[in-house]
Amino acid sequence: MSDNGSIHRLTTGSSQLDDILNGGIPENSLDIIMGAPGSGKTTLAEQLMFANTADARPMLYLTTMTEPLDKVINYLQQFRFFDLDKLGTAIHYEALGPDLAEHGVGALLPRLKDAIKTLSPKLIVIPTPPFTPPELMPLVARVLLVETIPF
């Protein structure tokens, strides 16, 4: 919170969505973006990351699929918000998919703790794997809520 009691917010990169959200997404919050496949959840999350790289704290995107980074970059290049110079410095992509495949959802918490300790990211994006059944979404959110480490 700021000195005047207002909540600091992260811009979504869309002025229209920021208006709907009273200025953006609240800082230090756990937010779940849900929608049907192809509805733009991943694009919104990546736009959010690129729009909030002004300070020294990096953004972290933990990929849950095994797509190579060059494929992700090729896809992102079609968007106006994409900035190649921010990759690896202001925005970090790390593959979580192999750990999830080998160890299940239990691999998530150690990776998060390590990332928070080493990078101290301002924002962490974790897309759910496409094979995640809807009934497991509350479990994934609960794991994050129970073990939240303050930034």
Image (cartoon, rainbow, N blue to C red):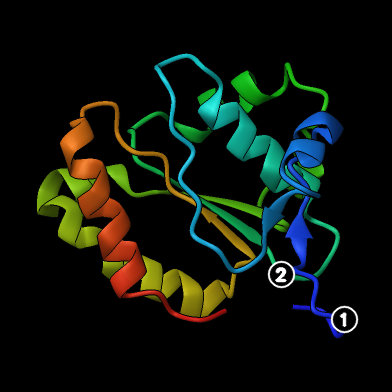
Quadrant of residue 45 in the image?
top right
On-image quarter of the N terminus: bottom right
Residue nearer the viewer, 144 or 77: 144
Residue type indicated by callout 1:
Asn
Q: Residue at x 51, y 17 (%)?
A: 39
The mark lying in front, picked from 1 and 2, is: 1
35 to the left or right of 129: right
Q: Say if 79 sits above or below 6 in the image.
A: above
Counting from the top left corner in percent of width and height, residue 38 is at 47, 14
Kindly identify the residue that appears in the image at 20 percent across and 53 percent down: 139
| Residue where numbered disc 1 is placed | 4
**Quarter of the image where the C terminus is located:** bottom right
Q: Which residue type carries mark 2? A: Arg
| Earlier sequence position, callout 1 versus callout 2 | 1
Circle 2 crowding by C-alpha within 10 Å: few under 14, some 14–19, many from 20? some
The residue tagged with tag 2: helix, strand or loop? Answer: loop
Which is nearer the eye, 104 or 23?
23
Q: Position of residue 69 (x, y in %)?
A: 51, 34
Q: In the figure, residue 113 lies in which quadrant?
A: bottom left
Q: Which mark is residue 57?
A: 2
Residue 89 location, x and y as percent?
71, 58
SS at circle 1 = loop
| Residue density around tag 1, few if under 14, some if 14–19, many if 20 or more, within 10 Å | few
